[in-house]
Each structure stands twice: as structure tokens, then as C-alpha cells.
Image (spheres, grey):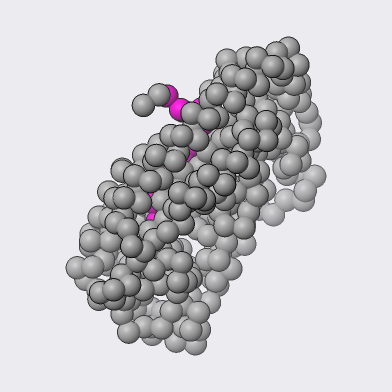
Amino acid sequence: MANYDSIIVSTRVRLARNLKDIPFPAMLKGSPKSSEKVVNTVTAACDKLFKYDFYKMSGISDIDRLTLQEMHLISPNLAKNTDNGAVCISKDSQMSIMINEEDHIRAQCVMGGFCLEECYKKVNAFDDKLSEIAALAYDDKLGYLTACPTNLGTGMRASVMLFLPALTKTRELASIINHVQQMGLTVRGFYGEGSEGIGYLYQISNQITIGVSELDLLKNVANAVIKICESEQSAREKLHSKLGIALEDSVSRSLGILLYAKRLSSGEFMEHIANVKLGTALNILDLSMPMLNHLTEFCQPASLCRYGGGKLSADKRDKLRADLVRSKIQER
């Protein structure tokens, strides 16, 4: 396979599971014993597989919850559940097991790059261990039972985060999305369902979870990702060829702003970091793509507040963001 490191940002595989004979999380409010049983089951499985940190949503600050969300370790739904929501996060931050989100258990593995098989192996190992110690909600015809019918069957979502500036700029993305949907897949924004493609970042994931095996789902997502990467690569070359010095000027101006701005709002930062990433991918600039991807995540509002030691005003966040971006780029 061709090298698509400048397009593929990260991979995630998630399994939704529920314990048998316990109501779905939406019905667990005021049932501490049932909620605690879910927690104990998850931690027992994690204990046998990896070292982890355990957080109750009620026991951490708003900033910490939002930071975990920005890092894609928990979902917006879990962040809001301060009644009985919790999460186990492996020490390497690859595995995160969300507890009492929409389902009792949402186990996910997130890794940088294109690694669907590796993510699946890790999350499947947890699923196997979970099945050994607990009876799961399962139906012989429907498969794994989930709170939302769209997750019935395998309960699996496999997704790949892609950086697609050229397809967006050339307005070819709409036809790509239409084609992907016909393949039983979907395209979501930076933070998943209901979010926008901020910074030209999009998640490609399976939409169908029932009537197909987990391995076939992985294969379908992988095939779609490769086709999209080929289209993005072609669109980048056409864009550079068509715009030439105008594109190089735009990229250089964005780099200048990131290097010399004293304040950077979140929106302005995402616009210019995306432009600089495109310039790096086209060899207009000599920068590290992993470093730029890390900055994209680290300079989100809650992550900045956590780094800065607590709640910060928008102005202080903008100043801190500009200082951090300048420092990291100059280190190159």
C-alpha cells in the first residue's frame, strides 16, 4: 500500500456491550447497585489485561472531562453523565473503556496511523475477557443487544480519521461522501456523530453493524479509506499544479501567522494549522506531520486550560495557544 501518512491521522475500533438482565444506562439512574456491578465487571476485566487509570465523571473537573473528550478518550455523552459514568484508560492511552455511556460498556482502542487490525486485536482481547467473567446481552438472531438499534449485531464501529483538505477545497468531497454511504459507511466530523469537519478532519466509519462479520466490517472500512486516500492524493497534486505560487503563498502566510501571532483563537488556529499541514504534505514546508497532528489535538480549549493549570479566559487561552504553537514549530 502507498504511504498515506500525511492523510491518515488515527484509527479507532469500538465495541458496544451490555450486561444481561441489567437495564440500559438510561434506566439506571437511582440504581447504584446495578451501576456498581457494571463498574466492577469492567475493572475486573481490565485488571487481567493492562494497567489503567480509573475516573468517575463525578470525581473529575469539567476541564478534565472536556480534555478527555478532546483526546477522543471519552464521548460527549459520557462527559455529561456525572450520575454513574466512568472510564478506564490504559496507561498508554490506547485503550479506553467507557462505563454507563449509552451502553453499559463501550470499549475502544485508538492508535495513530492506519492500524485497524491492531486496534481490533486489542479491543477484541478485552471483549474475550469480558465474556469470560460476565453474561452479556445477546440474541441468537440479532447478535449483541444495544441501547441504539443502529449498533445491533456486532456492536462494532471501526473508524479512521482522515485529513482531507484537497477534496474539501476542490469540492469533490460531497461525491466521495455519497459513494461511501452507498458502501454502507458514513463520514463524520472531528468529534464524531453530529460534529463538523474542523480543520479538514473527517472520520470514516461503518454504518452497518448487523448481518456482517467484524472482520468483513474492518475490510470494508479499510477498502474505503484506501480509495479516499487515493482521491485525496490526486486532488492535492491537481490543486498544487493549478494554483502553484498562490497555494505556496497561502501556506507560507499561514506559517507566518503561526510563528509570529501573539494570540490565536481556536478557529484561526485550526484554519492555519490545516493549511500548514497541507503545505508539509506537498513538501512546500519542511515540518513534522506527527508534531502538527499533536498540536491540533493539544491546542483545543480544555486541553489548554489543563496545561495552564485551571480555567482560563478566552484571551488567556489564545495567548497560551500562540506561545505553544510558536515554540513547537521553532523546535523543528
Q: Nearer the viewer, residue 136 or 46?
A: 136
121 inside magenta stretch: no
9 inside magenta stretch: yes
**Residue 230 seen in render:** yes
Q: Position of residue 124 (x, y in %)?
A: 28, 55
Q: Specify the quadrant that holds the C terminus.
A: top right
**Residue 286 seen in render:** no
* Bounds of the magenta segment: 3-14
Q: Nearer the viewer, residue 289 or 209?
A: 209
Q: Is residue 253 above or below residue 116?
A: above
Total tally of numbered discs in the picture: 0
**In the picture provided, is 198 more to the left or to the right than 5?**
right
- Residue lying at 71% horizontally and 35% vertically, measured from the top left: 271
- Residue lying at 45% horizontally and 53% vertically, measured from the top left: 184
Q: Position of residue 312 (x, y in %)?
A: 72, 51
- Residue lying at 52% horizontally and 66% vertically, measured from the top left: 78
